[in-house]
């Protein structure tokens, strides 16, 4: 059985799908930019690490050449949310419900011990790329 989803995993999945509306896969910088557009904040490295690990294990995300690709099921869930005009906040809650994840709440974020996808350097580089793009007016 897969590890249970965390509350922030639905935000991460929604951000990934938003980041891949016009292309098949998203980079770390793309995901950070979309995360900001969804919630006006970017996920912590620990949220990315644990979230991607759980989403990949559940088959909702695939990884290819350092790009992250939402599964057909994830896109189908997102399309259902968008077809009825849900806001990003409501769409995130709907995705959380579909995933069996707890609702996202404000408070301390649990720290995951295992590190898998992003080194500290990669996270910092992705964050720097996102910040530079946002300052230049090129938020994706």
Image (tube, grey):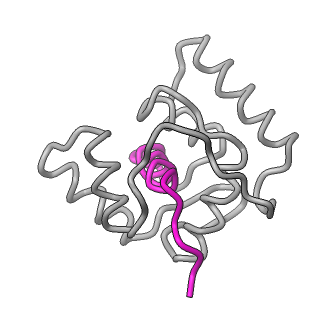
Q: As drawn, is 130 to the left or to the right of 77?
A: right
Q: Is 16 located above or below residue 126 in the figure?
A: below
Rendering coords of residue 62 (x, y %): 58, 69
* Residue 110, magenta (yes or no): no
Q: Is residue 136 left or right of residue 77?
A: right
Residue bounds of the magenta highlight: 1-24
Residue in front for this viewpoint, 34 or 46: 46
What residue is rendered at 67% in x and 65% in y?
64
The relative height of residue 32 versus residue 116 in the rendered view (above or below) is above
Count of numbered labels shown in the rendering: 0
Q: Name the outermost residue toward the front.
A: 107
What residue do we see at 55% from left, 54% from top?
Answer: 25
Q: Please name whichever residue, 13 or 129, is drawn nearer the observer in this view of the structure.
A: 13
| 14 relative position to 140: left or right | left
Spot occupied by residue 94 in the image (x, y as percentages of width and height): 27, 56
Residue under the point 45% across and 69% down: 71
Q: Nearer the viewer, residue 105 or 83?
A: 105
Q: Position of residue 104 (x, y in %)?
A: 43, 47
The image quadrant of residue 51 is: bottom right
What is the x, y in percent for residue 139?
A: 52, 24
Q: Quadrant of residue 97?
A: bottom left
Residue 72 position (above or below residue 122):
below
User: In the picture provided, is 76 more to the left or to the right than 85?
Assistant: right
């Amino acid at each position: 059985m897969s590890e249970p989803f965390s509350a922030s995993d639905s935000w991460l999945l929604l951000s990934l799908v938003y980041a891949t509306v016009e292309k098949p896969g998203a980079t770390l910088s793309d995901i950070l930019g979309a995360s900001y557009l969804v919630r006006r904040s970017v996920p912590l490295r620990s949220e990315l690490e644990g979230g991607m690990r759980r989403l990949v294990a559940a088959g909702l995300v695939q990884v290819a050449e350092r790009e992250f690709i939402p599964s057909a099921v994830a896109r189908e869930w997102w399309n259902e949310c968008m077809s009825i005009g849900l806001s990003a906040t409501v769409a995130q809650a709907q995705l959380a419900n579909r995933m069996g994840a707890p609702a996202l709440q404000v408070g301390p974020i649990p720290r995951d011990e295992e590190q898998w996808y992003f080194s500290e350097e990669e996270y910092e580089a992705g964050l720097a790329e996102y910040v530079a793009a946002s300052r230049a007016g090129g938020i994706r």
